[in-house]
Image: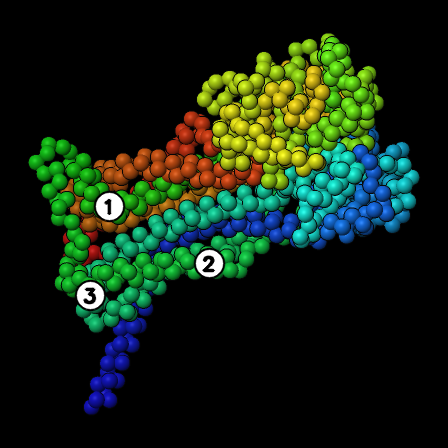
Amino acid sequence: MGRNAKAMNDSRYHKRGMTLNRRYMRNIRENLAFYIAAIVLTIVSLLLFFLFYIAGTGIMNYGDAFFERNNVEDATFTTYQEIPDDEIENIEKKYNVSFEKEHFTNINEDDYKVRVFEANEKIDLYEVIDGKDVSKDNEIVISKGYAVNEKVKIGDKVKIAGKSYKVTGYFLRPDYLYMLENPDDSYKNISTFFLAYMTDNAYEELGAQSCQYKVVYEKGCDQSKFRKAMNDEYMMSSYLAKGDNTRITMVDDQAQMFIIMAIVFLFVIPLITVALISIIIGRKVKNEQKMIGTLSALGYTKGRLMWHYSVLAMIPGLIGGVLVSILTKCIQQPYGELSLADYEPMPVKFTLPIPIALVGIIVPTALYMLAAAKKVNKLLKKDTVTLLSGNVDADVKTRHVMVGKSVKVRTKFAVRSILANPGRSFVVFLGAFLGAMIISIAFLFIDSINNVVDSGSNSMGDFKYEYTLNTLVSDEEALDMALNEGNVEDKSDQQESSVEHKSDQQESGVEDNSDSKDMTAESTTAGIATIESSKVDGADKIVMAKYEYDGSAFTVLGADSDVKLLNIETTDGKTADLDSGFYITNIMAYAYNLKAGDKFTFVNPTTMEEKSIKIKGIISNDSQKLVIGSREAVWEMAGLSKGTYNGLLSEKALDLGDKISKTVTADDIKEQMKTILDEMGAIIYSLAIIGAIICIASLYVSVNMLVTENRHNISMLKVLGLTDREINRMVLDVNHVLIPIGIAAGMAVGYLSMVIVFRIYSGMEGVKYSAVISAKSIVLTVVITLACYVVSLLIVRKKADNVDMVESLKDNRE
């Protein structure tokens, strides 16, 4: 008897399970629109994180491996006295460094400039990535960026110093992954400048004389001791640390920017999207309270019901996670290559890591299932009768809201609907919030870069040209005065001072030594060159020297107190009094965490001699790391002769002959930022498109939920004779007031997100990026978000129109 009873119970349980299982497909069909929208939301929100993460980690992993494989330098330096070859091994052992002399030459052709290197054996090795290396004296390999940009094919001939060479391959080298002709140039040059290698015999035929030194500091090396020794023994003329070499640091800097963006998106967009869908799932389960009460009364256990609704809830997370992983795998390489626009054409393989893909599948799925299980568990704590009546969490308080008020029924309905359903109202708010946030981030990126374009150069001053001279210069009158006052007494002493100045001052252009000349070559007296006063009329004369703080380079600049073209306006709106002390720029204060009144200690990069100043104030300049003082103060700091200068600021182009080492125009930074916008445009605008998709999908599921939960009311209003248009205005338009709030909040959070991103990135780049959004972008963000809302309403209204009048007459409604 007992065995038969058990068999009957098992049979009933099996039948109940079969009955419950049949609800899966029916539930999916009835809620197909929700599942599609939730899957789309899951896909696009995770896609943003995946793509930015893949770009950042792909670049960083390739760069790190490439640097290690080809032994990237720790520093490059030049000296006035050549270091003998037979001393290199002794230097390596004595100071625990890897050390190598690098030979190169710069050759100017009609349409391009080529820098030919003799192949290194230990440091900054080159790697042929297409074609093959040279084997004959008439063959060369060239840097790939130029080859791709100028369509130079393998097998083509290239003219160098009057001789034709056959291109056999393309290469990359670790200290030129970002192709700058000089390390302090504003932006890459792959149209008129490239690198080349040829056989040792062919290189010797060029008769090249220029050389520089590469060093890698081994573990335990005393860098300061090494640098001081090199200066004492061989007189350093320049020193460029890896951390200040944009050709090298650009790889990690931009990779970190992508990873930072990914982290911001990880914590903001996917989590908010998952939270939004979880709330909707919870509300959908709540709407099933009558069914849950019925199933509970029929004997289904709490665990069985929790699992049933959890399985339904897992569908968007599981399918969305799997589909976004597949989609990412399909587009990861072409999308990732968009992030390589600034570099040499690195053969990076962009891959979505399996652990990250699993996280994208498991986390949303688990949270959706948890939301459903939690809501079922909460409902089953209520009395079954209450569940069957559908009155769980019924808010009777709102029934008395606006009672007796002489306002339209539509207004009463709207107010009660919003107050009685805070969860539903929050979901609608989140939909607008998400869309506005992502769209505003895209516009913020564009406007912030444009802000640097428009105001960055202006913050430096009113000059159109900044000239760095290759020698210490004085006006003839100033030089005569210096001689009369005894400031220049001994030629050899003055030459030594000038040499020290050049070592202190030479701005990173270490590969341009072939163009540099001994500072006494054109000097009229005591190693100081002169320029006719008429040639520099109207220009501001400045003196500049390079220094280091914590391994990071900056410039000390001296100017006259009446300087016209240099910006010396402080952050409090006053004009800096250069005669009273030293000032630092905004980005300098930001990068080194300094403020007015601080004592600032730094070192000469060649002599390693310490200098200290007290910061008088902060100058509004977001683009240059400068310490600014009077010319007299900088002469004294750097040990230079009075009346001299090595830089000019001018409103017009100056004819200075071969005394110019470098020219920077006010348009350089604008061109750099415009190029960044052009090359990053695809990524930025895809962000806006994804934002619009998220906006439409999130608002759709939000408004769709509104229709689902108001089917009974819609049906009743139809019975009362209201038209579809009137019903839509009463039921669907009740949350119009929430949309502006959501848009405003989304834009605010988008702004704060970009503030964080730019704050981190500014510290790495040495240019202060401020989060800026224009009035036009604000309007566009609002318009696009509202358009997405309208689209979602149009889609949902068809569902509202299809609600049958019979719904209000049913005792049990879905």
Q: Tag 1: residue type?
A: Pro
Q: Residue at x 42, y 52 (%)?
A: 42
Q: Is residue 48 above or below residue 296?
A: above
Relative image position of residue 444 (x, y in whole percent): 47, 34
User: Which quadrant of the figure contains the N terminus?
Assistant: bottom left
Q: Is residue 708 or residue 183 the one in the foreground?
A: 183
Name which quarter of the figure residue 717 lies in: top left
Q: Secondary structure at mark 3?
A: helix
**C-alpha span from label 1 to label 2:** 31 Å
The residue tagged 3 is: 294
| Mark 3 / mark 1, whichever is N-terminal | 3
Q: In this rendering, would 216 be left or right of 1? A: right
The residue tagged 1 is: 422
- Residue 620 seen from this side: no
Task: Give the crowd class for mark 2: few <14, some 14-19, many >=20 residues within 10 Å.
Answer: few
Q: Is residue 579 above or below residue 253?
A: above
The residue tagged 2 is: 359
Q: Is residue 409 or residue 649 the one in the foreground?
A: 649
Relative image position of residue 103 (x, y in whole percent): 82, 41
Does the CB distance between marks 2 and 3 fall below 8 Å?
Answer: no
| Mark 1 / mark 2, whichever is N-terminal | 2
Q: Tag 2: residue type?
A: Val
Task: Give the crowd class for mark 3: few <14, some 14-19, many >=20 residues within 10 Å.
Answer: some
